[in-house]
Image (cartoon, grey):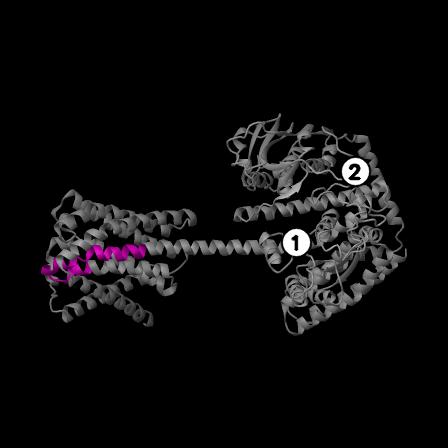
Amino acid sequence: MPKILNLAGIAFIAFCTIGLTFLFFTTLGDDLVATITISVLVVVEFIALLSMCLGWIVFDITKRKQILFIAVAMGLLLLSDLFGVPRLVEVRTLLGVEQALGTFTGLLILVLRLCSFSFIALSWHVANKAENQLGIDPVVGTATILIAAGIVVQALMVWLVPVLTSDVGWAFQNVRTMILFPTTVMIFASAAGYLVRCQYRFTLSEALLCFALLVGCFNHLAFFIFAPEHAEMVSRFIIPSRLISYSCALAFMLLELRRHYRHSFQASSAKSEFLATMSHEIRTPLNGVLGMAQLLQESQLDDAQKERVGAIMSSGRALMALLNDILDMSKIEAGRIELEKREFHPSDITYDLFRAVSDIAAEKNIVLLCEDAPLTKRMFVGDEVRFRQILWNLLSNAVKFTRTGTVRLEATLAEHTPERIRHLVEDEEVYHFAVIDTGIGIPKDRQEQIFAPFSQADNSTTRQYGGTGLGLSIARSLTELMGGFMTVESVVGHGTRFDLWLPFETHEPELHPDTAGVHGRETSGDSVLAGSRILVAEDNEINATVIRGLLQRHGLVVDIVPNGREAVLAFRNGVYDAILMDAHMPILDGEGATRHIRELERVNQGGRVPIICVTADAFGDRHRDFLAAGMDEVMTKPVEERRLYGMLLRFLRSRNSACRPALYSPDVAVDLPGSNPEADTAPSSTPKKHTPLEYAITSERDKVVKVTEYSRLDQASEASIPHEHEMDLIDKARFKDMITALGVDQMALLVEMLAPSYQEERDRIVTAIKQADRDSLCRAAHTIKGMASNLAAAKLAAEARVLELYDGDFTDTIQDRIADLDRLAADTTDAMRRALQD
């Protein structure tokens, strides 16, 4: 009963509003009405056309049949108006006269309008069906309520307004009125359907559409209620009423389009937030893995150990590349890729890329050729990272899909600027790059589809060769973003050729007397930055140890603090040349700490210390937030030694030489050429690259020898371990690698930190259980898991992960889990201590 009263009240108020508008037009003069009719007519039909077009667009995006049916209905109404409105304006007679006379135009108008309201009725029906909502029965009752409310309102108008009279009997005897009866029934059914939908699921868009239908209901009902002498009065309200109803229909389409946009934006934001979070969670431990492997690679290793470390670096970089592909595709789709402009040596990139794919090529007996002579004497200005990414995707694909033969990279200066290249500015040149292989080839009908995201030439390609199908899509998108273009030619079974044209600002590289790289002086600490004091704010012990190890190799003095608050206190009490600030830390994060430090500098009127953000957040939006907080540069994890040192060199060389005379002594040579920290990523100890470059192929006999050496090394390592139980607690290989990289003393310090750090997180777990705070429990267990994993405590990390995913009740079961975790932590610490003594 309350629902019926609500529906009756809503209908009564709506019809009263429409009735007042109707009465307003009855007071206007005939000339003014004629002028309004002619003026509004074009606007009304344009609104109908626009509503139909918008409806089709919304349907094309959402695939909702409800929207399609309404768009079709608006199209039919527009078509009927084109037939009927001219006659209506010219003769000022009732709509329906021509239908009653049986003319073809009249019958066509009648059928079109009846079909239009039928489609509107179908629209709410399919919407209800898609949402598993109410059926037709409530609509029948609501239609009866609407008819009753309309009759009551129009009866009140006759009673209150003397000029209006009623003659229902005449209406039912006149064929010109009765011809509208089917259309009247259908429009009331349409309005009733949407009124019911608004009752159980209110949306502004459908409420407006319902009001538009109620306007039509009022008009059709007026033909039956009012006396024939008021026919002209009713007809003059037709065009203004259509302006109102069509405008409401247009508003419905716009609101539906807006709603879809908001849902899409929210979904995109949720996806971006998820990817940013996953990026940070994956990059943080991966930073520890690659950083430790990088330090280990520079230590004294035999050939077998070097090969193992190389495998770790290769696998870690492959994982990082996969992560970057997913993140880049997300940013490209969102249009958030921003290109940088920095100087770099293009020949260094081609050299590095060929070194990266050389191992895979050697295993497959593939000859790698690099013909990049035009690049050796040029310096490019552009986005080095994106340029490297494009070539890497093309070269790695070429090696992956080539079983035997050659993979060749050709780089030449384009003699003529192709038409598809963007407009060039001063000092820009177009370079042509070609990656040619003798691989499996691509069928003709699939050569364009391979550039679509998650698409490959054949459905079995992923199973046979692996990959996500994102590489070529990213490469082409980045190429077009940089102002170039890419083409492909291929013959199945004979190979593939990718051609790439890119514009770059170029100039001759500057010559420096000291071309020694960072690695040429790292063992003696003879560095241009030796003696500089660096503050590292990092809550992850493994990451902090990696950064300290990288910096101390160059003679820098490093202080480490675990959170932002400690970083502010250290800055207040000490003098530092630069600060490396982690973005995500407890107590006070990197952004907050940076703001405090900048405020202290402003109050004390001191110099500005460079603050470099070290973060696993890969998104440009977050980077802009860090820079807005006062940071000077953002470096994404994992930390690379040459990039870290180059970035510090760039900032510290610009500081006041009077404050640090030793740092800027003219007698000290600069380790890195140029001012770009990323201009040279290859160690100076590697042989100079010649062009063309051809890598030797590893024989099958050498591969057998290497496998045998691996087997013997594993047996020797296992024989040297006295307790098998300890190997269940710690990862022996990784633990030994960390000892080699960091030294026994540093590793012993980290082991002794395990127990108090575990106890701190355990206390948080106990508190979380008492308060039934599942989120705090998850965070504390996650911290234990990361800490244990970084210390090679494999079993402790696995058990902490089980606790992190715990979704049961806070009963004795979880207490038993914590007790088991306590014993495991104590046993792990003892096992590590014994391993350090072996």
Residue at point 88% right, 52% down? Answer: 721
Residue type indicated by callout 1: Glu
The residues tagged by marks 1 and 2 sit, at their Cα atoms, a distance apart of 29 Å
Which residue matches tag 1?
633
Q: Hey, which quadrant is residue 600 in on the image?
A: bottom right
Say which element carries label 1.
strand
Residue at point 83% right, 63% down? Answer: 752
Residue at point 68% right, 60% down? Answer: 608
Which residue matches tag 2?
686
In this rendering, the answer to whether 742 lies above or below 430 is below
How many numbered circles are shown?
Answer: 2
How far across and how far down the image is residue 786, in percent?
A: 72, 59
N-terminal of the pair, mark 1 or mark 2, is: 1
Say which element carries label 2.
loop
How far across and how far down the image is residue 718, in percent?
A: 86, 49
Mark yes or no: residue 456 visible: yes
Tell me the magenta residue range.
220-249
Residue 316 vs residue 413: left or right?
Answer: right
Magenta region, main secondary structure: helix
**Structural crowding at the residue carrying mark 2, measured as other residues with C-alpha within 10 Å and reported as few (<14), some (14–19) or many (≥20):** few
**Structural crowding at the residue carrying mark 1, measured as other residues with C-alpha within 10 Å and reported as few (<14), some (14–19) or many (≥20):** some
Mark yes or no: residue 460 visible: no
Q: Quadrant of the N terminus?
A: bottom left
Q: Is residue 248 magenta?
A: yes
Q: Does the magenta stretch include residue 678?
A: no
Residue type indicated by callout 2: Thr
Is residue 27 or residue 69 the one in the foreground? 27
Is residue 790 or residue 570 the one in the foreground? 570
Q: Quadrant of the C terminus?
A: bottom right
Residue 289 vs residue 390: left or right?
Answer: right
Residue 576 vs residue 301: left or right?
Answer: left
